Image: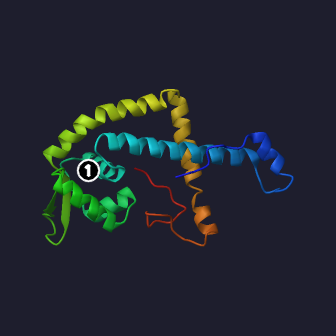
């Protein structure tokens, strides 16, 4: 969550360069807007999903399983793909199992392992949620042309590739929840 709502204008940032010559006013302005929009998007998504009786964590797991509903995914792969810890995935899967939205089964190739699959109830739930969800996303992004959407994906990807520098400056070698090097981007 990003708390700052009253973002400074470019001119105010430019004036700070006299005191802090390291500041790149345009970069900082873009950074603050990105943080504000990202936080607002996450808050809006959480509110939307809550209105559907869903958390972002549960929704993410269901969406990962929905990519190939007939294939099973191991809990550890779900943790890696969703960017949360294995313990968090276990808790999410426990809740989704109680709701009969997913099933855990022995892996046919290795009985020591389990795979998780969407149940028919899980598929039906997604079939009721996703049409409106996709409409909401289309509406949200509707002010951009297709070319601007492609450009936005490219620009955000390039920013994401440099996030590792913040972790390095903090003396860390990995980012939060991913367990992966902070200088690598992830895709969903």
Please report the residue visible at 44 percent of the width from the left and 67 percent of the height from the top: 179
The picture quadrant where one finds residue 93 is: bottom left
From this view, report whether residue 182 is shown above or below residue 36. below
Task: Say whether residue 17 is left or right of residue 86.
Answer: right
Please report the residue visible at 30 percent of the width from the left and 59 percent of the height from the top: 78
Q: Measuring from the top left, give residue 47's x and y in whole percent.
A: 39, 42
Q: Measuring from the top left, give residue 33's x and y in whole percent.
A: 62, 43
The number of discs equals: 1
Pointer 1 residue = 65
Which one is nearer the viewer's eye here, 185 or 99?
99
Q: Measuring from the top left, give residue 55's x and y in whole percent.
A: 33, 49
Task: Say whether residue 121 is left or right of residue 157.
Answer: left
From this view, report whether residue 163 is shown above or below residue 35. below
Which one is nearer the viewer's eye here, 19 or 50?
50
Mark 1: secondary structure:
helix
Q: Is residue 73 visible?
A: no
Which one is nearer the viewer's eye here, 29 or 69?
29
Q: Is residue 76 visible?
A: yes
The picture quadrant where one finds residue 166 is: bottom right
Task: Say whether residue 4 is left or right of residue 69.
Answer: right
**In the rendered view, how is the structure colored?**
rainbow
Q: Measuring from the top left, give residue 168's x and y in whole percent.
A: 61, 68
Please report the residue visible at 30 percent of the width from the left and 46 percent of the height from the top: 54
Callout 1 crowding tier (Cα within 10 Å): few <14, some 14–19, many ≥20? many
Please report the residue visible at 15 percent of the width from the left and 44 percent of the height from the top: 121
Task: Say whether residue 43 is left or right of residue 105.
Answer: right
């Amino acid at each position: 969550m990003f708390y700052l709502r009253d973002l400074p204008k470019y001119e105010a940032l430019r004036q700070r360069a006299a005191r802090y010559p390291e500041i790149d006013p345009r970069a900082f302005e873009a950074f603050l807007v990105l943080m504000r929009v990202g936080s607002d998007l996450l808050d809006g998504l959480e509110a939307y999903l809550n209105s559907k009786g869903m958390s972002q964590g549960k929704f993410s797991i269901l969406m990962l399983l929905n990519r190939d509903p007939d294939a099973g995914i191991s809990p550890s792969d779900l943790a890696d793909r969703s960017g949360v810890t294995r313990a968090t995935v276990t808790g999410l899967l426990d809740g989704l199992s109680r709701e009969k939205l997913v099933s855990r089964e022995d892996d046919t190739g290795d009985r020591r392992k389990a795979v998780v699959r969407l149940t028919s109830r899980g598929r039906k739930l997604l079939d009721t949620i996703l049409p409106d969800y996709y409409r909401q996303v289309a509406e949200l992004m509707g002010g951009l042309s297709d070319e601007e959407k492609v450009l936005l994906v490219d620009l955000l990807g390039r920013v994401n590739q440099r996030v590792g520098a913040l972790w390095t400056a903090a003396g860390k070698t990995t980012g939060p929840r991913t367990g992966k090097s902070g200088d690598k981007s992830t895709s969903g």
